[in-house]
Image: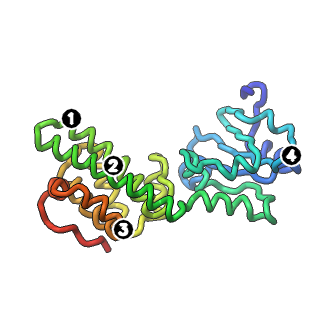
Amino acid sequence: MTSRQHPLAYDSFVALAAADPAVVGLILKGSRAHDGMATEHSDHDLYVVVDDGATTELSHLHGHRSAALDIVVLPLAEFRAAGLPGFERYGLARAHVVLDRLDGGTGIARLLAEKGRLDADEAFREAGGLLDAYANSVYRSVKNDRDGQPLAARLDAADSVRLLLELLFTLDRRPRPYNKYLEWELARYPLPGWETEALLEAVERISATGDVAVQRDLFSHVEACARRAGHGEVLDAWGEDLALMRGGAGPAPRPPV
């Protein structure tokens, strides 16, 4: 449906959906759900959750997109699985509940909270793979810088930042925020053991220049966190190559406080 056919406004649609007994939940995500992030260009991204087996005339609006309102209509069973895994997980984890008729008015909020917390076993498995991939990018970047390949070194450094952020949030059992919301997220929910301003400065420096000294300093903090979380075997598998990433052959660094 086009915006010309259905020039829907957010408030009027919410009232319409709330009056429909088939609707058990309304969820607002995106910029409008992140305090201070909305602009004059921001639309309202709305999930409409319909009780399993129920029918509603709102279903024909699934996929509606306009400058003011984007609508996703789906049954409860599909909503339970939405973003698990997937890029939607962070958006839903930080979404606002507009209407909650599930389980006495707390069910939708509970499902969103579950999307915002990774299972411990799931997080441990994913963190191990992410740590290895992050170390690989740092190693390649530092080695390319040593061998006179500046472009390759910067590209590998940029790759390492993406993997680093995935790793750090996974270690804290949280979905990584979209880049747009990284500073917003860390300002409100800092990563344990990390000073937000220093982390963001390092990420910006590495992304822009591939600075090897900053990469090595950051790697030493990541190594400490990873060992504390039980991922020492992943790092030890790198053997003598760890020295290049650390900038020396010293022992594993102490965990940050």
Whole-number angstrom distance, CA of label 4 to CA of label 3 = 47 Å
Question: What mark, if any, has residue 151 been given in the picture?
Answer: 1
Q: Residue furthest bottom?
A: 257
Report helix, strand or loop for mark 2: helix
Identified at 33% across, 59% down, the residue is 199
Query: Which of disc 4 and disc 1 is earlier in sequence?
Result: 4
Give the amino acid at mark 3: Gly
Query: Disc 2 marks which residue?
Result: 133
Task: Give the foreground label among 2 and 1.
Answer: 2
Q: Earlier in the sequence, mark 4 or mark 3?
A: 4
Q: Quadrant of the N terminus?
A: top right
Q: Foreground mark, 1 or 4?
A: 4
Looking at the rendered structure, the secondary structure element under dot 3 is loop
Q: Position of residue 187 (x, y in %)?
A: 45, 61
Spatial separation of the CA atoms under disc 1 and disc 4? 56 Å
CB-based contact (under 8 Å), mark 2 and mark 3: no
Q: Which numbered marker is on residue 230?
A: 3
Please name the amino acid that badge 4 sits on.
Answer: Ala
Which mark, by number, is residue 256? none
Badge 2: residue crowd in 10 Å (few <14, some 14–19, many ≥20): some
Q: Dot 4 surroundings within 10 Å: few (below 14), some, or many (20 or more)?
A: few
| Residue denoted by label 4 | 54
